[in-house]
Amino acid sequence: MRMRIALVAMLAGLLFLVGSLWRIQVRDVSKYRSKVDRQSVRRVRLPGTRGLIYDRNGLCLADNRPSYCVGIYIEELRQPGSWSNTINRVEETIAKLSGVLHLKSDVTREEIRKHINRRLPLPFPAWRDVDETTVARLEELEPRLPGVAIYYEPVRSYPMGALASHLLGYVGRSDPEQDPEEPWQYYHPEMEGKYGVEKTFNDELTGIAGGYVIHVDASGYRRKDFVNTELKPREPVSGSDIVLTIDSRIQRLAEKALEGETGAVVILDPRNGDVLAMASSPKFDPNDFSPSVSAEEWDKLNTDPGKPMVNRAIAGIYPPGSTFKPLVIITALESGVATADTTFDCPGYFQLGSAIFHCWQKAGHGTLAMRKAIEQSCNAYFCQLGLRCTYDRIQRMGDAVGFGHKTGIEMGGESAGLLPKKGRGWSGGDTCNASIGQGAVSVTPLQMAVFTASIANDGTVYRPRLMMRRGDAEGEVARKMLWAPTTMKVLKGGMHDVIEAETGTGKRAKIPGVEMAGKTGTAEFDSGSQRRKHTWMTLFAPFDQPRYVVAMVLDEGVSGGLSVAPRINELMRGVFSAESPASNVTTTVSQGDKS
Amino acid sequence: MFKDLFLLKKLSWVMAIAVLLLISIGICFIYSSSYVSEDQVGGRFLYKKQIVWAMVGIVCFAICAALDYQEWGKVAWLIYGAGIFLLVAVLIVGHRTYGAKRWLDLFGIGVQPSEIAKVATVLVLAQTLSRPAIDFENLKSIAMLLGIVALPFLLIVIEPDYGTALIFLPTLFVMMLVGGVPMRIMMSFVLIGVVAVGTVLGVLFLPEKLGASEAAQKRIMHVVGLSEYHRDRINVFIKADVDPLGAGWNKMQSEMAVGSGGVWGKGFRNGTQNILGFLPPSVAPTDFIYSVIAEEKGFFGSVVVLLLFGVVITAGTLAGLRSRDKLGRLLCVGIVTMIFCHVFINIAMTVGLMPIIGVPLPLLSYGGSFMIVTMSVLGITQSVRIRSRSTVEDFS
């Protein structure tokens, strides 16, 4: 009897084990499976190659090049005993290499240790982005050092150097958020746009990451013989290429026009808002950021008083000076407070109460009508015209045409400028100041270009665009101003005379063969003993059917007519002489569309 | 003797087949588990060695089955004496592995005296309990029984080999129970056991709970002959994650291996835990062979192995039930209980239900002396069966 009880007890014991096995192997299987994977499966993530950036003519502006790295496979240097023996061995190897390759090493023990803990099966980068001489030296090395191998990673390169640097931006190593649930992911360095187009269109440019799975054993070694068939490697997919509206020849001319100066130029196609060139000076070389920027370089770029990292074309805010006057003309004519024949007297200044507003022509312009006032950029005339308009009207018109608002260009860091509303304590003097583009009003060069384009277009304002997308050659109309043709005729006539008339303030911009129209501007910004001036010029050309709109500003100059106009002259000569057959074709096409 | 060999056709073929299946499964998975260590010299020969041991074991099985088990009763004391002698010897000249002296080098063969002592004690106890003269009302008899058990038990504890010691107690307890020791005496044994376990746990953990200093805790432990080592071992068992990279490693990895097997397993030679070395190659073919099976053949494979053990245990017990005398009955019960304890403890520790105490899985784990001992004692149960009443009646 007791024996049977013993037997039953034993069989019950076995049954109990079956129950435990059921719990572990069947009920909780997924829990244990994921635990096992967590410790033995490592995912290596491979970023897709970054898409290329082209200008409108197919010239490559941003490319990828292979960057050679000297890698050390620590697994192959594994020493018996504790890991610090291995780290010693790795350090010895690096020291040896350092002698042979004539390279200095700044690898710390801590970095090696971290690499061992976190990504042992991947090569440890002893040197990144070494030159070909180093690669050759290493290849020739006899006897070969164990565990040392060259590997490469793609690195961004900009074949045109600093050309359009502010526009293109640069890339930097992205810091993928480490998923705390997946501590075993191995990342290959991935580049991410940090500035400019690289940043704005990062999603398009970035490829789809691929990856593969490696099995590691208990001590973290890669097991080549063990292939997990369930997880096949996935090839990374390259990012999309993008084509910019930029014409690199015009861009080059624009940058040349700024050479040696601090300032910005924006050139638009008024017919659709294409940004043909956008330059800011001083510039930087985005290649300095690939594969990574050194701390001193970064400091230098950021502490430079010329602020090379600022894209003045969209982020620089300047008082517009006389380039703002066309807005006053439009306001006056559209509100009916004045006509083309409205005259004001200029004795060389305009006095309002105790305040005196000087005209640049100290002798005075005498009595002049509107067209002449534009040509001469007479401050006395515009103070009186502005007062007649009232600031409210000017502000409303300016607001409607886009001042004080971002243009919506596909780029980060754009400023909105400022077009203040009439507030408490607003005086007639403030209105006078605003009418001649001084005081609180401030604009970006891009805003000025868009405004000029809307004049050239008789009121149609396109959103400036950077990326050529298939299927929309038309451009996106941001707003349509219902300006009377008579208004435009007067304004454009005045602007024509600015350049084409013998006495025009912008006559130095005049070039043979092409009729152009524009407006100069000079804005004082440092009051007191040191009177410094921002100098402007806006322009559209050819006069009859404008294809180009230019807005240029120099941070410091004598006056728009003297400092900027000669540079614009050279720029436009270059633009028209280099005009490609391609852009002529588009001209005919769009003309055909209109007819 | 030849007439005895003729009797072999009367042995339990059900048990023989189950035993052979278990041995084959063992060899297969020793091959699978050591497949990983191909680059290690000798690693891949482990299964070949096991085949040799299995053949030696089968021969021992046959011999023990053919021999009349009454002979074992006669030499029981001799073997017991030898076992005690070896246990003492191992403490003096034994090999120290993993901080314990368990192995003895006999003519180039590693022998675990505790294995022999285990069997010897079962034999002596069966012999003593089956003596007609035994009187359980006599305190002297009880004292003698206790003495027979206590001597080897204490020597094994000193080694220390807690796994074997843990098998000792239930085996001998069941034998006494079946041997007819009165209930009240059995109950008092249970009481003493509970008090002893309570004392040990109390000494190990109570001072800490009461906030005694580390030094004071150690002092108290040493008074009763325990050390931090014991406390840590039990701690690992109770708090699974207390030391995942130290003492808890094997337990955790084994549990993960078993759990990740699922219903059907990852396939022969595809156990990642084993191949990738998370289950250390030194223990995978021995104490943790069951987790290799469970990982590669899943719940299905694990249950098949348990079923086969169930068959062996049942067949062994039935042999005892049919025995014509008390000695045969007690031998069978002792042997079966011993096997069961090995199986239960080994599998329980494999799936994380028990602390890791180094108990091999009979017939499956790699190891020569254990294979021979297991096969021999199973042979004894067959010897009992062959000479049982029904068989003898058939024969006459």
Image (cartoon, rainbow, N blue to C red):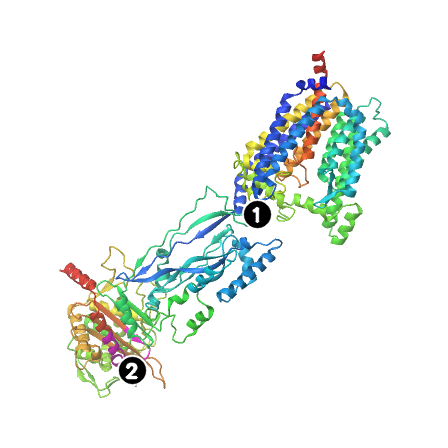
Image coordinates of residue B99 in percent, x first then y, are 72, 46
Instruction: Please state if A345 lies on the left or on the right of A215 as rendered.
Output: left
Q: State the image quarter where residue B376 is shown.
A: top right
Quarter of the figure with residue B230 = top right
Camera sees residue A402: no
Instruction: Name the residue rendered at 58%, 35% in the picture.
Output: B29
Pointer 1 and pointer 2 on the same chain: yes
Q: In the rendered image, which residue does mark 2 sit on?
A: A558
Residue extending furthest toward the bottom: A363
Range of the magenta residues? A552-570
| Discs 1/2, front | 1
Mark 2 neighbour density, 10 Å: few (under 14) some (14–19) many (20 or more): some
Chain identifier of the residue bearing label 1 in the image: A
Number of other residues with Cα within 10 Å of mark 1, as a class: few under 14, some 14 to 19, many 20 or more? some
Q: Position of residue B120 (x, y in %)?
A: 77, 31
Q: Is residue A469 above or below residue B98?
A: below
Whether the magenta-drawn stretch holds residue B204 is answered as no
Which residue lies under the disc numbered 1? A218
Quadrant location of the N terminus of chain A? top right
Secondary element under disc 1, as helix, strand or loop, is loop
Q: Secondary structure at mark 2?
A: loop
Q: Residue furthest top?
A: B396
